[in-house]
Image (cartoon, rainbow, N blue to C red):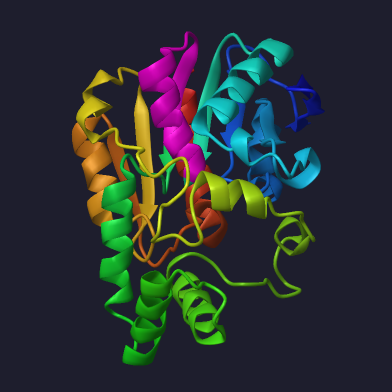
Amino acid sequence: MPYLGYRTYYRIAGESRGDKAPLLLLHGGPGSTHNYFEVLDRLADEGRAVISYDQLGCGNSFVEGRPELWTARTWLDELAALREHLGLARVHLLGQSWGGMMIIAYLCDDAPQGVASAIISSGHPSSSLWASEQHRLIRRMPEADRAAIARAEETGDFSDPAYLAANDRFMELNCCPKSYGGDAPECLRREKKHGDEAYLYGWGPNEYVPSGSLRDFEYVGRLSEIDTPTLIVSGTDDLCTPLVAKTMADGIPGARWELFQGCRHMCFVEDNERYCTMLSAWLAAHD
């Protein structure tokens, strides 16, 4: 899809039949890719189009050297453009991590028509709450790791090997493995082009220092404006802590919260069977 003089890559699995609204997937980051969402292709077997895309700045939509682009507005306008491009008058939206943030901003700021339901998977409504919870998780780590992370935050030097190793351990504990073994689905092992610039200028150097354009992302006080049926999903060992998830579940009228025991930041990968069963039922109930 042409967008801002570049091209946005999208992928469609299956096609919708009858009254089944397509499912449009918004990946995390900013700067990750659609790849991991391919584990949800099985939903297409039920007669529902499953649409994913690489947001501008990453993957097959890679762009760099344009730090001014990496704002929520760039990606929200891209979402609206993709809906128009594909004729998605009625659609379910599922956003993971940053994708969940996108859904919140999209529903609150743009008041879009035709969103049948929203699934916020390990997202958040507040950068300050997110940072606070990440620092609480850091306090559970060994003293040497805590010290390395604290030094990096104090000095602004995020290149020190001790910090990098500590951050890798933090992400392994709360997000996902640094790499997947040969028994993992191919889409998780596939080499991908990360949008490092999009992540740095959009979010920051890591999950607990929001210093980019999204540092002032604060929607807790506006969650009550969302009148779209909403499902909140998170894991017990997630960057999206139970406090973050409960804040969204309490703030969005009528929202339902599903907590996945033992899962980190990618519940749809770590408990794919339960996730797909839950998601299939949710979508059918809100078509």
- Magenta highlight on residue 120: no
Residue 87 left/right relative to 206:
right
Residue 9, image quadrant: top right
Foreground: 59 or 284?
Answer: 59
Give how far across and how far down residue 121 sits, in percent.
44, 44
Specify whether residue 209 is in view: yes
Q: Residue at x 65, y 31 (%)?
A: 46
Q: Residue at x 58, y 38 (%)?
A: 70
Give how far across and how far down residue 270 sits, in percent.
53, 62
| Bounds of the magenta segment | 98-119
Specify whether residue 31 is in view: no
Quarter of the image that includes the N terminus: top right
Give how far across and how far down residue 13 sits, in percent.
75, 33
Give how far across and how far down residue 83 sits, in percent.
64, 16
Image vertical order of residue 100 relative to residue 145, above or below: above
Question: Which residue is at the far front?
Answer: 155
Q: How many marks?
A: 0
Image vertical order of residue 35 relative to residue 256, above or below: below
Q: Residue at x 65, y 26 (%)?
A: 48
Foreground: 263 or 106?
Answer: 106
Image vertical order of residue 253 relative to residue 211, above or below: above
Foreground: 257 or 281?
Answer: 257
Q: Residue at x 43, y 75 (%)?
A: 152
